[in-house]
Amino acid sequence: MEEISYTYSDVESDDYQSEDEDGYFDDSRDDISSTTTSSITQEPIRPLTNSLDELMRKHLMSTNICSAVVMFNQKGKVVLSLGPSDFASSLLASVFPDLLNYFHSDPSDDSRPTTLHHLDKVHHIFSSRDPFSVYTVTRRRDYGLCGVYLYDARLVLIGRYNRPTLPQLAAHAVEAACDHLRELQLQVDGFHSKGSRTHRSSALATATWTILTAAARDEAIHNSQDAKSSKSTQVFKMMRRLQLQVDGFHSKGSRTHRSSALATATWTILTAAARDGAIHNSQDAKSSKSTQVFKMVKRILPQLKRKSSKSASQPPMEINSREVQHDVEEKEDCFTWLPDELVAMIISALPVRDQLALKQVSRNFQHWVSVSGLTTTQLKYTRCWDKCGVFFWIGTNRYRESYTNPADSGRVGVSANHRYSNIVGRHPFWARNVGDCPDTYYEIDLGENRLLCPQYYSMTYGNDGTGWEPRNWKILASNDRKEWTVLREHKDDNSLNGVFATAAWKIDARTTKSNKQRRFSLPWKKSLDTSSSSQGTKTQHLGFRYFKLVQAGKNKSGYYTFFVCNFELYGKLHYNERRDETGSHYEGTDGVNTMITKDFTVSDDGNDNVSNFKPISRATPLVIVPAVEADRQI
Amino acid sequence: MASESISVTTSDDQTIQLSRKHAQMSQTINSMLEDSVGADQEAIPLPNVSSEVLKKVIDWCTHHENDPAPVEKVKKLNKKREYKAKNSTISDEWDKNFVNAELRVIVDILLAANYLDVKGLFELMCKHIANELKGKTPDQIRERFGIQDDLTEEDKAAMRKAWGATKNDS
């Protein structure tokens, strides 16, 4: 609070001349007028807000633009509303009918406009996840359409705070704001003496916006107790500059210039405030972030200059409020215009890997991704032949059907460089037709709807005679089938001994290294790899889509026959519920199987030719041993 | 009875003429026409579509007027419209130019296509947006679409925990 008053008094005393010249701002907005009121019953505040309210009412009839600021708490209750009291809520009701129906207001209100301006784009922003949200709403009369009002609303701030009670916090914010207001009212009185109506209203507008900023800042400061002062100082430097600009315009005396300057300053301040709030929220925000923000604000300013001087020659009516907003916000988050369902639908069509990346983008995306059905499940290893593994989970369609071999039903793709490739079946199976080939491998594709962060894997020696147990092999994983990460390498591993012996191994994310000495687990700072990772940069994975078992040496009896079956993986599985249910990805003839096998090159595997690389899981008849029986066999 | 052109009123109170053929590519307008067979003099109100966007939609319809009607699988009829990521590349050159616009325009067109129920256009726009989102890191997406990172460190920590990723492996 000391900081606020400091800032303002500084503005008062400084006779800084604006660096901006006439014609800088267009007069797209004829006037701005607003005032403040508070829905919170705070004794000392009452009289002031009431008088301001009255003042506002006088002007409301004569002005073309009204603005209001409304702050909600997480239950959707209005905790702070700046602007004419009835105006704010009724306006919001008309712009966000869905939103307002949550708590009060009559949708058949008289003030519901005939034309809604971008109704869809904002209504979903409000959600119970946000502890509070602040909206500004603007009503503007459009002359081109003879008295039709255009409504515009915008979310300026979402934040969170850890204060014990909301009313306390909001009251505090209002109190601070009103302290300020008293000072400003003196200004207003000064304008009164000059007698011009517009003078008064623009001063009021300034007051309102300053209050808003102060309130927002107040919140922010309360949020993070250890917020660095440097950041806020910067914001206030910026604000002061803007204020001075406004003052400069005042002295020049053109009515339109003044108001549009106010409008611009307002938006910039708001943006800055919102960003400031965001920064303060994250407790360990790096200073680099704030630097970025200020670069942004600085960049916006000259743009505004350019734009307004360009459009100054055009008739003012053509410049609508939406354009102005775009200038200020540079790139608007257009996704917020779309209904949730639509964004979720688009997201659900993306591969899981991209969905995970989107989830890290912002809060809105986090929400959309969860609506789109992205789910994570933990498949924990208990023992060999348990029913907790990935392939059992897939084979039973998430434990909802009786088990079928997932490769047979096409839910996962399997392939190998020899005849027998169906190693995901749940039964001890004599892996016939495995040739004596040094680089025998099996490859499994979980499909683009699944991503596994592996923790354990188990497999069974696939022969009913002893002597050919595998001793040297590797398990690899990949997301693009080009760059493989070694999950675990086994050298002279004696775990598998005896007929259909089964064993499980842990995959430790921290010790595994890929073939390029990269760690596979995710160092969080750098997000998901984009398959096009350039050489030298580290790749990180949240999980893998492809898994590969590769023979890396002779078996027990010195041959290169690699008999394994009943391969099973455990770990964290990311999948999309929606797409899994419809199974749309596996529909049709071009399923995973063919996709995998068709672009295989012929290995140096003697007699086999390309025709052998058809989806073997479908071609080879298999005897399915019921799971119960399989359990008994151990 | 059917006149060759149909007039519609957009959200910004403009009346736009479009040919019956184009109008019928929109299921929404089509059903409106069927409902009001007798009175085809009146302009159809489209309160959710602005004239600017509607012109774009008509552009698209003009280019695709001779496309074969989309073949729908019978069993899919009862389902919600599903958009598949497969074949996500946009093959038509004209379409590529068409989607080469600012995102806010794209989003407006998508909303209009959704409202007017122009299936081909709807899918094209979905595809385009999906392609834009595909294969990018969160930072790239934020930069591309001007989205603010409003996730707090706690949020990220929670995600990290949920996904079983280990921190600072680098």
Image: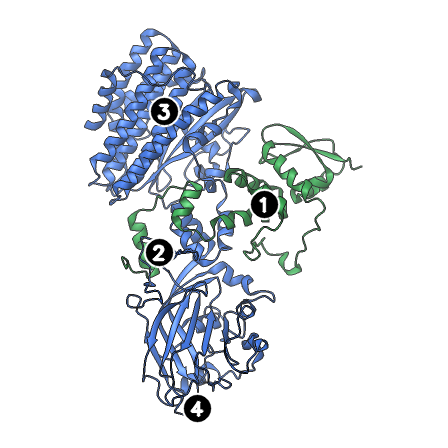
Q: Residue beneath label 3, please?
A: A265
Res B46 quadrant in image: top right
Q: CA distance from mark 4 to mark 1?
A: 59 Å
Parent chain of label 4? A
> What element does badge 2 sit on?
loop
Specify the amino acid type for callout 1: Lys
Q: Where in the figure is residue A424, as x and y percent of width and height?
A: 46, 76
The residue that mark 2 highlights is A537
Q: Which residue is mark 4?
A: A464
Q: Nearer the viewer, mark 2 or mark 4?
A: 2
Q: Please say if A22 is above or below A301.
A: above
Residue A266 in view? yes
Q: Amino acid at mark 4?
A: Asp
Relative to A352, does residue B92 appear above or below in the rendering?
A: above
Colour that chain B carries in the picture: green
Q: Earlier in the sequence, mark 2 or mark 3?
A: 3
Q: Are marks 3 and 1 in contact (CB under 8 Å)?
A: no
Residues flagged by tags 2 and 4 on a common chain:
yes
What amino acid is at disc 2?
A: Thr
Q: CA distance from mark 2 to mark 4?
A: 47 Å
Protein chain holding label 1: B
Q: How far across and down, in percent of the image, does residue A543 sit?
A: 39, 63
